[in-house]
Amino acid sequence: MIARKFQVSSYSALLGLSAIALTTIATPQAVRAEQPILDTLVQQATSKDQATSQQAIAKLREFKNAGVDAFWATYQKDLPNNPQLRATLDAICQQKDCDASRLYWYKDLEAAKTASKETGKPILSLRLLGNLTDELSCANSRFFRTALYPNAAVSQLLRDRFILHWQPERPVPKVTIDFGDGRKLEQTITGNSIHYILDSEGRPIDAIPGLYSPQAFMDNLKDAEGISQSINNSNGDLTLRRELLVKYHRDRYAKLEKKWQADLTRLRIPLQPLLPLAVTDPKASAALASRLTVGKMMVELPTLSRTVGEPLTELNPPSPFAKLTDANWARMASLYQNRVYLDQGSLKVMERKLSPTASIRTVVNSFEKAIAQDTVRNEYVFHAQIHNWFANGEFINGDTNLLTTLNRRVYDQLFLTPASDPWLGLVNENIYTGISKAQ
């Protein structure tokens, strides 16, 4: 049996004890003292009675990482082959495929800020289209759950040194293809994701846009954590905070510029500046937005090319981000391909989702190449622009709305999915389709 029967005299008394436990759960002694409570909640979380299960899951979430660890430790041997157990753990973590990552995520930014103040850790706040708990969230967030969060080193870094939070930017667009014989194909068709590094007041320090290789992702996290600690030591001095952030981003940008020029030289490509990017009043285009990230493009573009209602010759519009041709981006990515590899945690997630007839080696090789290309594009295009904004003094004052303002700029100008277009570039009012207009 999955769940052993536990007899407790009073469930309300148990909840009272768990509330007391939360005040001391940080110490090893407290974890040992409250282990019986955790054990009972773990068993109740798998109850067939929905109310009992939901109450236990909610209480396990109050224990944060300790609640995740208690459930995982109890069922780790059963989780790989038991979808129901995995769904329960996902609910505790608030992340799909949490059995591979064991990460606890806050849904409430205010609660994450409180945890950040208590621990001194910066916040890593994910913005995505859709929900991190859903199989069909936007493509990049699905790739994070495959390539990044299950990676042993990434997972440990996130658990030990960051407070994790996610928030949906907007619902993710989905398309269903009905083949008319009972078969249906459903997938997402546009949308991008970004990790913001925030201080304990929720103000942005840096941002990691889109998909990166695990090593590059960790390198960026460690850099941002370093400046976060320096800001923590500024004792609330906003002038010093500003100076620290401007210098940090100027240094990061200068390092990127030097690396960019070196890569162009190695590939014998004519030198060109890393910036500026002429991004003004961007026009939403789902096809262009999809092409900005290679991993997403592989998934979404075949469907988009048949659904956006644009002439096929317009699917490759001139882009302000087109520093290089796709072929030269691929050449540049090859310079770093040996730093891009998926560890066993990621491979297990992939194997679980692939068709039994798929060639795992072929799929992995293709995915790793896409990750390498996304890493160089995201770093040299999106992250360079973000560094430039901060280096020029934007988004670094004491305003608590800075994150909202920065996020709007990112989605409008970098990801080309502006809030002003509710259709995300999927509807062209000047193209006749023979179908009644979208409502």
Image (cartoon, rainbow, N blue to C red):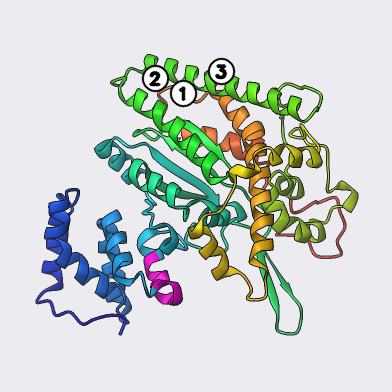
Residue drawn at (72%, 52%) of the image = 297
Q: Which residue is mark 3?
A: 392
In the image, the segment drawn in magenta is 79-89
At label 2, the amino acid type is: Arg
Label ID, residue 439: none
- Residue 195 appears left or right of 78: right
Q: Residues within 10 Å of mark 1 (few under 14, many from 20)?
A: many
Between label 1 and label 2, give the one nearer the viewer. Answer: 2
Where residue 178 sits in the image (x, y, percent)? 73, 76
Location of the N terminus (image quadrant): bottom left
Q: Residues within 10 Å of mark 2 (few under 14, many from 20)?
A: many
Q: Mark 2: which secondary structure?
A: helix
Q: Earlier in the sequence, mark 1 or mark 2?
A: 2
Q: Which residue is mark 2?
A: 241
Alpha carbon separation for disc pair 3 and 2: 14 Å
Location of the C terminus (image quadrant): bottom right
